[in-house]
Image (tube, grey):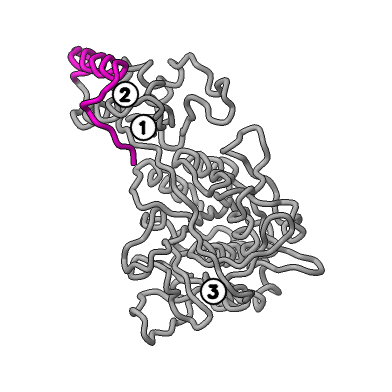
């Protein structure tokens, strides 16, 4: 969160505030909704020296968006290729930009529907301690490989990238995009995304591990940097990329506490276009308090279980969870050809994504809603001893595929 003291505004801030107030008195801008103008004034006072955060601006209509983009004279790719001055987000009729960039075009303020901070969020994981490669067999995925291996199902993994040079992933990664460093390939420099990709679709030939859907096609969408943090706008653009290139599934093993209308709009548009969005519920051990984007109603929200068929202690839980999956001490691929054990609802999410790939390979054309219902109806019962009673069960590849094929 940014903080500021209105009593210590710089001259530049005072000039900007006066400029906004002057424009607000004009006949044209008086037509603005009060809430939008208040947002603008709120963000204008935050323009402090050394702090130049980014914002997500949305327009009322696609026509407004196109008008604004045509009006802008500055190229989208600025002199700084790492983060351009503005980043189009067509899927939500908006863009990500700095406040001073929009300040150059204040005359078009009546076209703006909303402004929100481009929040940074982190991928979700907690380190494990013990080598227990159990998740894939626990959900009985090997039992269905004679009928489905996820062949030709395209999965966009929005994460820290993927180490596509890993021996177990060389036959699994088909492409992707780097939204952090636009001129580079989506190579993982953190490890989290590689771990997720391995659980979904690792396909070793001699040694190594096998993922839930070993013939599925992974597309690395690198929106998170080496620290495991990302701007909401980069995630939105990652979703847009997945829609444009017709991913079947979008894996989102990350979460944030704050609600973003822009992110929800992107998820909604992706699901309406036929993409299945799978998201991790969070690692706070809370009941009915999920992270976003798992909290959005159109996603498939995933909680984590352990080897005892119980909800993992760190996992969020309750009626808002759509399905549970193994997430405690999961062994999977890591950077530089290595392996690592990690725990978290992120790891559980990758198991569910793999099962959905098996489903779509066996029966293409299933809708996101049908997939969610089939996962829930065919889930395994969880152990309730010393646990809060869950309303959902644990994903079962065997039972779910059986229901599709019969």
Q: Which residue is mark 2?
A: 111
Residue 163 seen in render: yes
The magenta-colored residue range is: 1-30
Residue 126 picture location, percent across and down: 50, 64
Q: State the quadrant of the N terminus.
A: top left
Q: Which of the marked residues, 2 or 1, is nearer the chain's N terminus?
A: 1
Inter-mark Cα distance, 2 to 1: 9 Å
Q: Which of the marked residues, 2 or 3, is nearer the chain's N terminus?
A: 2
Residue 237 picture location, percent across and down: 50, 39
Looking at the rendered image, the disc whose residue lies closer to the viewer, 3 or 1, is: 1
Q: Quadrant of residue 166?
A: bottom right
SS of the residue under disc 2 = helix
Closer to the camera in the image, 378 or 232: 232
Left/right of residue 96 with respect to residue 45 in the rendered view = right
Residue 383 picture location, percent across and down: 43, 84
Residue 18 picture location, percent across and down: 23, 15
Q: Is residue 17 magenta?
A: yes
Looking at the rendered image, the disc whose residue lies closer to the viewer, 2 or 3, is: 2
Q: Which residue is mark 3?
A: 400
SS of the residue under disc 1 = strand
- Mark 2 packing: few (<14 Cα in 10 Å), some, or many (20+)? some
Left/right of residue 247 with respect to residue 70 in the rendered view = right
Inter-mark Cα distance, 2 to 3: 48 Å
Q: Which mark is residue 58?
A: 1
């Amino acid at each position: 969160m940014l903080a500021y003291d209105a009593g210590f505004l710089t001259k530049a801030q005072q000039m900007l505030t006066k400029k906004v107030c002057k424009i607000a008195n004009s006949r044209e801008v008086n037509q603005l909704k009060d809430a939008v103008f208040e947002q603008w004034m709120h963000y204008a006072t935050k323009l402090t020296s050394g702090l130049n955060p980014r914002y997500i601006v949305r327009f009322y209509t696609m026509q407004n968006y196109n008008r604004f983009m045509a009006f802008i004279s500055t190229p989208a790719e600025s002199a700084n290729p790492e983060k351009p001055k503005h980043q189009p987000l067509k899927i939500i009729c908006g863009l990500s930009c700095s406040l001073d960039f929009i300040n150059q075009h204040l005359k078009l303020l009546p076209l703006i529907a909303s402004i929100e901070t481009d929040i940074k969020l982190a991928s979700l994981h907690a380190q494990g301690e013990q080598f227990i490669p159990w998740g894939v067999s626990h959900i009985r995925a090997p039992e269905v490989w004679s009928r489905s291996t996820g062949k030709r199902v395209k999965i966009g993994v929005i994460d820290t990238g993927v180490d596509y040079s890993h021996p177990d992933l060389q036959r699994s990664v088909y492409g992707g995009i780097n939204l952090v460093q636009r001129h580079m390939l989506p190579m993982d420099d953190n490890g989290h995304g590689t771990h997720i990709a391995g659980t979904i679709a690792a396909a070793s030939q001699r040694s190594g591990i096998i993922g839930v859907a070993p013939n599925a096609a992974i597309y690395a969408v690198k929106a998170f940097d080496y620290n495991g943090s990302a701007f909401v706008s980069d995630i939105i653009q990652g979703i847009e990329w997945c829609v444009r290139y017709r991913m079947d599934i979008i894996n989102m093993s990350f979460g944030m506490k704050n609600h973003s209308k822009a992110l929800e709009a992107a998820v909604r548009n992706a699901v309406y276009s036929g993409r299945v969005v799978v998201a991790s519920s969070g690692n706070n051990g809370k009941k009915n308090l999920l992270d976003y984007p798992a909290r959005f109603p159109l996603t498939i929200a995933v909680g984590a279980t352990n080897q005892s068929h119980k909800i993992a202690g760190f996992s969020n839980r309750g009626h808002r969870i759509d399905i549970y999956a193994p997430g405690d001490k999961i062994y999977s691929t890591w950077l530089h050809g290595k392996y690592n054990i990690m725990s978290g609802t992120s790891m559980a999410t990758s198991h569910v994504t793999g099962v959905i790939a098996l489903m779509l390979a066996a029966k293409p054309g299933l809708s996101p809603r049908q997939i969610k219902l089939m996962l829930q109806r065919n889930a395994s019962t969880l152990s309730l001893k010393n646990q809060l009673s869950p309303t959902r069960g644990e994903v079962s590849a065997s039972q779910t595929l059986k229901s599709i094929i019969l």
